[in-house]
Image (spheres, grey):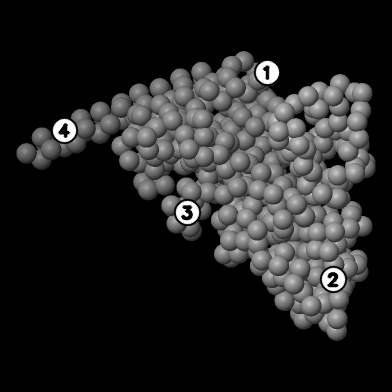
Amino acid sequence: MKSLLSFTFLVIFAFSCVTQKVKVSKIDHWIDSTQIENNSFVGIKIFDPKTQEVIFSKNEKKYFVPASNTKILSLYASLKNLGDSIPALKFALKNDSLFISGTADPTFLHPDLPKSKVYDFLKNSTAKTIVFSDANFRNEVFGSGWAWDDYNDYYQVELGPFPIYGNIVRFKKSHNTLAINPPMFADSLFSSQNSFSEIKRKINENIFYTNTKIGQKIEFEQDIPYKTSSDLLQKILSDTLKKEVTIGSFMPDKTFKTLYSLPVDTVYRRMMQVSDNMLAEQLLLLSGGKYSDTISTSLSIKNLQKNLFNDIPQKFNWVDGSGLSRYNLVTPESLVFLLDRMLKEFPKDRLLSLMPIGGQAGTLKNTYKASVPFVFAKTGTLSGVYNQSGYMITKSGRLLIFSFMNNNFTGSASKVRTKTSEIIALLHENY
């Protein structure tokens, strides 16, 4: 009887090994099929957090440019450091003046976020003068390695201690009526004979040019980052509040209180689902506020790596919050490690609701169409880069963590995006 049981166990074990090898072989074939050109590079890790089983891995310890997968790092830092509401500003009422200092909160009058109580707090203040200081902002307005010629594009907004209106000008034409927000930029738009297809800002000035092509459009919308400065912040804030605002130079001390704006998940969800770079960069700055009153991307990253990411399998080369920079380098294994940690430290339903949702929301809205969503993952795209990292629920009900990274291909990302999605769908069907 013992011999029979032993033999049966060996047969089952051997069959299991063969089945696993067949599955791994299939996955390997699927992965190879994503390499549109011989010079492209793919890395992947698929992990079962419940059984601690590595389903498949390939080049998982190699470094890749993560693009917007970098936002997973910013999300984790924010989840750990920001509590349940966004710190909006530091304030102190002294005599007849309200002294305020920014925290890097990106939400004040942001056109795509709900209104917070910060506007009413400032508008209804009994102080005769609002004194704003940006002395705590020690940062460049652009991230390390950002492309200079993207200055006019909505996705490369200048950083600041207290963004207003998302630090963008929104030009919106409806039924031949053009609205400009903030309104104070209405007299900064001029006609041009140039043939560019959109509104263009002068690189170092808040002067905008349009042309007859745009004039012929009945519907039109474009967001353009404005050139930030202390003086401009003072003018916009004063114009918006209809109150006297002056610029001072002071650091907030222990007498300053903190005012909060929106619930954090409202901001996290937009950052992750539509891949909002501006929110990601400002949230990174906010997360660093736990360790220092100085608002600085490099200081935030240094402190976060020391306090939150010191045991990551392969250390990140991390320079910004959004993934705009190609200087960022991350491995699939490290992203899976971080996604696994997030699952252990925060409720699963909360995490899945923040991610782009296959077939339903964000950058995966048109992918993975199904009656019940099964992919919850962050995408990341740059020229020659397409990645997906996140969570997948298989047909058998297993929750898997995956990081699928494609770098160094030429041409459009659409083919790689399609192949990647096909493979993840096959994993869903077969596991």
Q: Secondary structure at mark 1?
A: loop
> Looking at the picture, which amino acid does disc 1 mark?
Gly
Camera sees residue 104: yes
Residue in the picture at 53% in, 23% down: 418
Q: CA distance from mark 1 to mark 3?
A: 36 Å
Disc 2 versus disc 4: distance between alpha carbons?
83 Å
Which picture quadrant has residue 276? top right
Q: Which residue is mark 2?
A: 130
Q: Position of residue 17 (x, y in %)?
A: 31, 30
Residue 203 percent coordinates (x, y): 90, 37
The image shows residue 404 at horizontal and vertical percentages of: 54, 33
Residue 171 relative to residue 331: left or right: right
The first of marks 3 and 4 along the sequence is: 4
For image coordinates 78% across by 38% down, the residue present is: 178
Q: Label for residue 289?
A: none
Vertical side of 412 occupied by 153: above or below: below
Q: Nearer the viewer, mark 1 or mark 4?
A: 1
Q: Which residue is mark 4?
A: 7
The residue beneath circle 1 is: 411
Task: Spot the residue most to the left.
Answer: 1
Q: Nearer the viewer, mark 2 or mark 4?
A: 2
Mark 1 and mark 4 residues within 8 Å of each other at the beta carbon: no
Which kind of residue does numbered mark 4 sit on?
Phe
Tell me which residue sits at (13%, 38%) in the image. Answer: 5
* Number of other residues with Cα within 10 Å of mark 4, as a class: few under 14, some 14 to 19, many 20 or more: few
The amino acid beneath tag 3 is Arg
What residue did someone put label 3 on?
A: 350
Residue 59 can be seen, yes or no? no
User: Observer-nearest residue: 373 or 428?
Assistant: 373
Tell me which amino acid carries mark 2: Ile
Of all residues, the one furthest to the top in this rendering is 37
Closer mark to the observer between disc 1 and disc 3: 3
